[in-house]
Image (cartoon, helix red, strand yellow):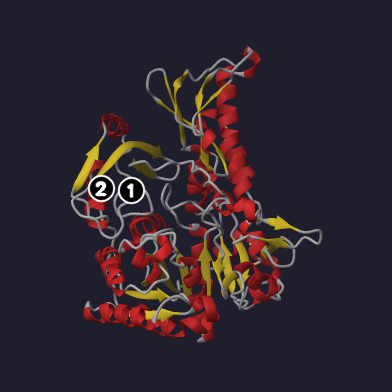
Amino acid sequence: MFKTDLEIAQECVLEPIRDVAAKIGVTEDDLEYYGKYKAKVSLDLLNRNKDKEDGKLILVTAINPTKAGEGKSTTTVGLGDALNRMGKKTMIALREPSLGPVFGLKGGAAGGGYAQVVPMEDINLHFTGDMHAITTANNLISACLDNHIHQGNALDIDIEHVTWKRCLDMNDRTLRNIRIGMGAKANGVERQDGFNITVASEVMAVLCLATSLSDLKTRLGNMLVAYNTKNEPIYVKDLGIEGALAMVLKDAIKPNMVQTLEHNPVLIHGGPFANIAHGCNSILATKTCLKLADYTVTEAGFGADLGAEKFLDIKCRFGNLKPNAVVIVATIRALKQHGNVAYEDLKEENVEAMLEGCANLAKHIDTVKQFGLPYIVAINEFASDTPKEVEALENWCKEHGHPMSLSQVWAKGGEGALDLAEKVVALCEEENSYAPLYDVEDSIEDKIHTIATKVYGADGVEFSEEAKQQIALYNKMGWDKMPICMAKTQMSLSDDAKKYGAPKGFTITVRELNPSLGAGFLVALTGKVLTMPGLPAVPAANNMDIDEEGHIKGLF
């Protein structure tokens, strides 16, 4: 019987975070402690090292996720540990988990097996309070906006054209579409409203893309909240609260340091979803790692069609980052599901289905190659993988000229990724021709078309009438020269979650667009993707508990 991720994490004897920080030359003067094993890292640390040459940047991405699991975070942590075992000064940069998935279906985001970040329970729950601060800042905007309308509406805000939504870090479908201000006049002006999940809030995107506290404040001020009755934009700065918002986020902007099970330093900061947001940890955390370490391993959410595309088209563009190599994670189980094997049958050997599912892997490889980056396929091993399946996948990689490595990090930690680490180090020494896929000066339609055809493999894009009207407005406002953040199902290359593998002959439907002017990009919502998820029939929360001594069980 295998130990659970939680049991493995609970058995770990953690080192004091000051000792972990000392391994990369960070002293107590730059740490703000949250207990013995967590700390905020001062922004002064990055400022003092800003002229230092960056280390190598390694991006970990994956195929389209399935219920079978891919292990992207697990591979990221294991690779970071392996590089440190080789004597390479390495840091890991990850995102913070959202409570919605933790209590819902997906679970936490601290890795798995013997490739985890700890303290696992803290990271997956309240951590250092960043999510709460972001939620508070978002809802402070909502409160001030509705109060302004109630108090006379000097800005002439059109209550039918308020774009800002409230947020909550929980999956709660009942809050997607609500009516507020009902009842007595003292309750405010009645209008239609709704909630996003916190990780889809523009405040989250702004925090992750800000390069300083002053940049954060400017970005917060530039966020669009509504239009007036003349169809002119109203921004946060028009409400005069950007200073208060920055104050609420003064600690949240600082990266969080924790450790792996092998006691190597990790920065965890920011947590935007990659299906409805840009899916990357903060620029500040990544840049800090690049200045302190020779190698930085980071991940971007879901498959290369979402997280990696946004990392390479948005985050790298804004942060002036130059990645050196990409690791594409796949599992034999997930490949079989992309080959149309039912989840219940994945433990059965099926070489044919796996090879059919490799079409999905091939498309993600193609995407990474289009960005001009060297790559390697990491096969994240499961106990149910058979020798025939492993051999067939290795042969498929060889036949198609794809470098690969069998990763055993779940069972062995860093030791299980030594081969992968050696190959990644070699890739980092190669010259690359990285460049974003599109020019921001292209039209909105052309940028979306580029992503849909080159990354998803679509035949084209269809725009709803609402989307066409929004594009016309954004062109008029001068908002058209921004990157595009696609909101799309993570389960498929298409915008239909049920289409596995590498579908052909489909179009992407853009139903609406939202300007995230503080973040600096336009969000294109496709298909049926939602910015407030719901819970499954049996939420993960049903299997969680805590005893009198405070020991948690059921968290994963």
Q: Amino acid at mark 2?
A: Lys
Is 298 or 556 nearer to us in this picture? 556
In the image, residue 188 sits, relative to residue 250, either above or below, namely above
Question: Secondary structure under badge 1?
Answer: loop
Residue 399: quarter of image: bottom left
Q: Which residue is mark 1?
A: 483
Question: Mark 2–mark 1 contact, CB under 8 Å?
Answer: yes
Q: How many marks?
A: 2
In the image, residue 291 sits, relative to residue 312, either above or below, namely below
Quadrant that contains the N terminus: bottom right
Image position, residue 368 (x, y; %): 30, 66
Side of 141 relative to 344 (left or right) = right
Question: Secondary structure under badge 2?
Answer: helix
Q: Which mark is residue 5?
A: none
Residue at the right extreme of this rendering? 548
Side of 507 relative to 523 (left or right) = left
Is 378 or 373 nearer to us in this picture? 378
Image point (29%, 76%), residue name:
431
Image position, residue 108 (x, y; %): 56, 59
Q: Earlier in the sequence, mark 2 or mark 1?
A: 2
Residue density around tag 2, few if under 14, some if 14–19, many if 20 or more, within 10 Å:
many
Image point (41%, 77%), residue name:
385
Q: Amino acid at mark 1?
A: Pro
Residue 23: quarter of image: bottom right
In the image, residue 254 sits, relative to residue 329, either above or below, namely above
Q: Which residue is mark 2?
A: 447
Image position, residue 77 (x, y; %): 52, 72
Side of 490 relative to 29 (left or right) = left
Q: Is residue 88 visible?
A: no
Quadrant that contains the C terminus: bottom right
Residue at the top extreme of this rendering? 185
Image point (45%, 27%), residue name:
226
